[in-house]
Image: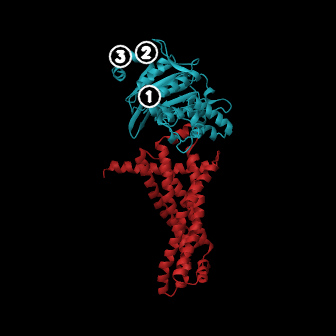
Chain colours: A red, B cyan
Amino acid sequence: MPITTVDAAAKRGVAAVQQYSLLSARAIVDFFRPPFYGADIITQADLIGIGSLPIVILTGFFTGGVLALQSASTLAQFGAAAITGQLVSFSMIKELGPVLTSLMVSGRNASGMASELGSMMVTEQIDAMRALGTDPVKKLVMPRIVATIIMLFFLTIISDLVGIMGGAFVAVIMLGQDANQYFHTVYQSLQYPDILQGLVKPLFFGFIIATIGCYYGMSTRGGTQGVGRSTTQAVVVSSVLIIAMDFVISRFMIGIFGR
Amino acid sequence: MTAGTALATDIPESQAHPDAPAIRFEDVSIGFEGKDVLDHISFEVKRGETRILLGPAGVGKSVLLKLADGLFRPDSGRIFVFGFEVSAMPEDELFRLRESIGMVFQESALFDSLTVRDNVGYRLIQERVPDDEIDRRVSEALNFVELGHTMAKLPSELSGGMRRRVAIARAIITKPELILYDSPTGGLDPITSTTIIDLVIKQRDVSKTSSLLVTHRLQDAFMLATHRFNTDTGEVVTLPENQIDPSTSFLVLHQGKLVFDGPTHDLVNSNDDFLKQYLA
């Protein structure tokens, strides 16, 4: 690859990070400046939160179920099938609940934001909004970020609960374990740092999903083909960032709390 | 020329510098991805004047219009609107200045999820004007473009010409001092184009609004120069032979440069090879 191509690609990459950072910073500042678009936040919360509920419930339930199924057979080899509930709750609350919920919400909503804002970009609706005296970052980006962070937090809690119930379904109904024992081990060894870790993650992941979705939407160029490209990139980049951020937060929390 | 930095809050921005022209470009250049689009452009639109910007497709006419509305920033040069330097104003101040500017976009740029009523009254809704006041003013603007019956429709239910008329209604609802028309007849059939140009003439002659109109259709441009709105009959009529509208003049862009800036008579009698070929 010629040096000039590498140079141009590097500059584009740096410029993209700069634009993304500026958009995110402006959206955060806009949250504290009037006018406050409360109705838009509620509309987005409905679209993102309530709209994602079915896929989050289904994903959570089957993830909890398959965790119980896989771990019970392995644990049984060591005579430890009784702690299936503990393994399910640990995995769901600390890792799989936040990460899988975020990935599902990312697939559904980062793509939705990128395509919606991207379509508005290529049809000059964003320019029209600016020409009509409305700040599109404040009107379109800020409500999506706030709504995604809040709703992903609650969706993760729901996913955790449904996942534990899915694990219970498999452990009790299919594998014949004792229900009291399952639920006892679910909460027995959980400590506050574990729950804190599971609840901090969706706040960061929600921010990533909304800002990446909005960034790719707002930087869409090149007609309908550009909208498609932005949509794909938004899902890919937000998914990768969620997993990378999960590693960073986990390492950070383990460093602080030792677990 | 005043480079306004703080906009007055009690008087319209358009009246803060009453002696300043509606638009003034000073040596403005802009390029995209290493390619020069506009190269050292300078011109002026006086108050109450209509200037028609002609040029081949892709020459940068829409870019120039967006520069005038502060939607793009020039790479060099200065742009003044009503005496305020839009090329140096922060976005927050631009939002307030744009209350005095109406813009009609090339493809209408109506918000496709909002009704015609909400599109036309968008600015009023954002300003939290009472609903009955919004309804009254939206109705007035839609009646001006003869689309009073479309309030509850969505843009997708309208024809291309109707969408363009709704975009005009949206641009004029706040009675702006300056209107920027980006190819208002682009992609429309000749009859619908005439209807749109009639509306532009009506707006020019009734409200005496300053305007900058981009087009590549010569027939539309010359219709603007040779017709006027008769307020008695409510119709657009042809001016007597050899008369042209004195407030309407032309700008022509070619290869990023302004190759003509002057009245209709000078344009049609120009000896410039490109202009002769373009007008032929």
Q: Nearer the viewer, residue B47 or B123?
A: B123
Q: Chain of mark 1?
A: B
Q: Which mark is residue B74?
A: none
The chain carrying label 3 is B
Q: Going by the picture, which residue comes out furthest to the front?
A: B149
At a point 51% along the width and 24% down the height, the residue shown is: B198
Q: Which residue is mark 3?
A: B271
Q: Position of residue B272 (x, y in %)?
A: 35, 19
For marks 3 and 1, the one nearer the N-term is 1
Mark 3–mark 2 contact, CB under 8 Å?
A: no
**Local SS, label 3:** loop
Q: CA distance from mark 3 to mark 2?
A: 12 Å
- Residue bearing the label numbered 2: B265
* Towards the viewer: A52 or B35: A52
Residue A6 % position (x, y): 35, 51
**Amino acid under label 1?**
Thr
- Residue type of the residue flagged with mark 2: His
Q: Nearer the viewer, residue A57 or B150?
A: B150
Reply above or below: B271 against B24.
Answer: above
Q: Residue at x 58, y 84 (%)?
A: A178
Q: Which of the 4 image quarters holds residue A155?
A: bottom right
Residue drawn at the location 47% of the way across and 86% of the way down: A77
In primary-sequence order, the first of circles 3 and 2 is 2
Of labels 1 and 2, earlier in sequence is 1
Residues at discs 3 and 1 in contact (Cβ within 8 Å) = no
Residue where numbered disc 1 is placed: B215
Q: Does residue A154 sit above or below A115 in this rendering?
A: below
Q: Secondary structure at mark 1?
A: loop
- Name the mark nearer the viewer: 3 or 2: 2
Q: Secondary structure at mark 2?
A: helix
